Image (cartoon, rainbow, N blue to C red):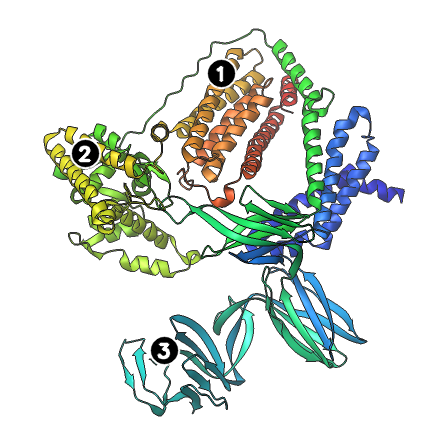
Amino acid sequence: MKQVISAIGSMKIMALLMLIFAVTIGYATFIENDYGTETAKAVVYHAKWFEVLLLLLAVNLSLNIYNYKMLQKKKILIFTFHISFLIILIGAAVTRYVGYEGSMHIREGSTVNTIISVETYIKAVFDDNGKLSQHKTPVFLSKMSQNSFSADINVNGKTVYLELMEYIPDAVYGIKEDPTGNPIISMMITTGGSAERIQLSYGEYYETSNTVLNFGSDKTFIRPVVDLYVQNEQLMMKHPMALRYLNMDDQSSGELPASEGEAAASRMLFSTETTSFVVRDFYPKAIKTVMAKSTEGPQMLDNNGDALLLKVSSDDESETVAIFGRSGVIPEAKSVMVNGLNIQLSYGAERITLPFALKLEKFDLERYPGSNSPASYASDVILIDKEQGIHQPYRIFMNNVLDHRGFRFFQSSYDRDEKGTILSVNNDPGTWITYVGYLLLTIGMFGALFLKEGRFGRLMKKARKASEEKSKISMAHGIAFALMALMLSIPDLQAAEVNQVVKDVKAFDAAHAKKFGHLVTQDSSGRMKPMDTLSSEIMHKLYRSDTILGLNSNQVILGMMTRPDAWREIKVIRTTHKKVNELVGNAEKDKAASFSQFFDFPDDMTGYKLGTYVEEAIRKAPGKRDKFDKAVLKVDERVNVVYMVFTGSLLRLWPKPNDANNKWHGTMDALQNFTPLEAEPIRMIAVSYFTAVDEALQTGNWEVADNALKLINAYQRKEGAAVRPSESKIDTEIWYNHADIFERLWPLYFLVGLVLLILSFVKILKPSFKMQFAIKSTFVLLVLFLIVHTAGLGMRWYIAGHAPWSDGYESMLFIAWSTVLAGFIFSKHSPITMAATGILTGLILFVAHLNWMDPTVTNLVPVLQSYWLSIHVSMITASYGFLGLGALLGFLTLILFILKTTKNEKLIGLSIKELN
């Protein structure tokens, strides 16, 4: 027994268990992404073997705490660190076995005291001559592996055996041809504007408020009846009233007089005064069967969720029943008679009654100005607890959780009509246990960092000593080292013939375009931004560059808006696919095409050359689109963007006076949809501005155009004051756009790090090499870069109005920042660490500026409107910087081991100690 305990508590077993645990939870993440949370729970998180793995880890940790005698004063922080994991595991166990969660749906004015469980159950209710009993079992079923479930249940002396025969995820009832089956019709019927797909087996009927479709039933009806019947395996119908018809293939139409028998052709729409129906398919011999939704071939019917085929046995009787259900939905029970028992079987969520209730007084949804994008939402509820005499109003939103009697209510979602709310609910006694564990973990970690006798303290002493010994090996101090960095701008290499069109588009004054860039516009998501930002985004979308023909983005967009006739001849739409180039008349290797090239008749914009190909690509599933399809869709999007700029619909410059949603409109939209009183000043300002621009292009004097631009600005200030950004924010965003802080920083970070790394290896191989000046210079440069980096993040935070780690691009910027911070913390005695910091930061910023990263500043989705979540995300994101730096230092250590020889063994050994 001692040997078993000793083996379980060994460090080798700990390493093995930790490896298995790490691989398992990593694999579970991929399972959850591909198959969903239910499958991840079934395969990993709620699997017995995983619980055994966690138990073994807890036992191993407990034995190691005992074996290494951690419970003593001098090791108190180490003990705190290790015991915290045990407490976290205990909290997780309480959550797993005691806690539960669900959702609560409340409509305005309604009071609800139940929640719908997240867990799914197989439930059986038995009726034995009026004696009721029930049995339910929580189940987690996997979409990727075999599932098993069985239960022996005693019902008043009768043994009932339930066995899962098959689990069919995303199941549907399908119609399958079968020689032993009956006639089945698949139809689409429309009544009162709502369409419904129905299936009628022989002997069934479908009744609306005005008409009956009868397929061979013997029932007598009061309403007019369309009788459907089979004659010589052909579907026929008789109708006592006239029917209108529409052939869906050739669009022919007419009226059928009342008839005692005629063919009910498929794809023929028949209509009465109130009802329309069409026969989709007719099966002379078929059966209805349960199958996976992805199955091809048979006619698919409505999706009912997941299906379970359960075999119910008692004595010598057995029945197989298909029941449907899914997580978060109360199921409908299916009845079956076995051995004199009426058994109601169901699969799905359970309704849980709470000891109190919530009444929804009002649901509030705030949108970003001028858009349908939600900015935040909240529920005004009244907490009603009769047992405790509580009748208290409360407002639940993202940062405000309702806690009562162990239950926590979070704002989760809402109804489409915005008259109801959906709250996620949990009752988890393990939460506070886990929080205590995290607190102890934090104390243990940070305490170990600053404890002189701790592991980290000893490593710092070794690094310091190694650095001092390396200094003694050098024969002299300092070298003359200078590091220069240049900000390079890429010259415009666009080659175009100097013709009248090019002269026209180049005539737009840069100073006036800069003032144009200070106008404010509203994008489709409701974000208010300077025109300078929008013009840059448009140019990147169209041309992947801020400039063309020597013109900046403001000049280009202003020109496209005021001189579309000239700009439609300029190659501004990026096309790189050779087949697309061929279609529009480009050379195979051309990189761009003009708007006119996409039309057979550019003057009236008819004969769109990509139209057929776009339709074909859209009809394909995203996963089946080839490179040409994707290229066509991208180019088509760019063509549409150009058209929207030409028409002004993309440039929403005009706020609608006194609009409740503060929506801004394009020029044509405003003139057409505003009231005459609202539209007249816009018309006058727009006409005066366009006229002034035309005159300026002729005379070269832009003063009048500048004054006209001021009128637009004044209109925006007056009518759009509620949402227009402050001047300081506009100026900051424009400065940020043109500074290109992060794109300019990455080569500087990388260059400084690379030079220092090369010098560090030279120092290792040649101890007499002096590099103190290089180290100090690098440190100063990295400090300067970090200050600029921090300022850039701060500006982005100020511009966006939220913390700069809400999307992929911002996360990369923040990880790069945390990498530099980690480097300063750990590189005090190691130039290699400082070099690695510069290289890794440069690489991270380089990746952030690849084409698949979107640097656009966007509005925040409501779920991220939480300061707790911001703190949580910032800590996790920052940790990646520390992790990445540690990984790179480990890689450099391996290189040092490779370079290690008998001649340089001492110096390289000291360098390795520095890095460890």
Would you name the residue on which mark 1 appears? Answer: 780
Q: What kind of element bears circle 1?
A: helix
Callout 3: few (<14), some (14-19), or many (20+) C-alpha neighbours within 10 Å? few
Identify the image quadrant of residue 915. Answer: top right
| Residue depicted at 41% across the width and 17% down the height | 484
Identify the image quadrant of residue 41. Answer: bottom right
Residue 312 horizontal side relative to residue 559, left or right: right
Identify the image quadrant of residue 42. Answer: bottom right
- Residue 477 placed where, x, y %? 55, 7
- Residue 259 placed where, x, y %? 34, 91
Look at the numbered discs 3 and 2 and tell me whether their residues touch, using CB distance below 8 Å. Answer: no
| Residue depicted at 55% across the width and 50% down the height | 381
* Numbered disc in front, either 1 or 3: 3
**Is 185 drawn above or below residue 895 in the view shown?**
below
Would you name the residue on which mark 2 appears? Answer: 708
**Which mark, by number, is residue 402?**
none
Residue 891 horizontal side relative to residue 123, left or right: left
Q: CA distance from mark 1 to mark 3?
A: 81 Å
- Residue 93 placed where, x, y %? 73, 47
The foreground one among 707 and 384 is 384
Type of amino acid at the residue the image marks with label 2: Ala
* Numbered disc in front, either 2 or 1: 2
Residue 522 horizontal side relative to residue 399, left or right: left
- Residue most extreme to the bottom: 260
Q: What kind of element bears circle 3?
A: loop
Figure quadrant of the C terminus: top right
Q: Earlier in the sequence, mark 3 or mark 2?
A: 3
**Which mark, by number, is residue 274?**
3
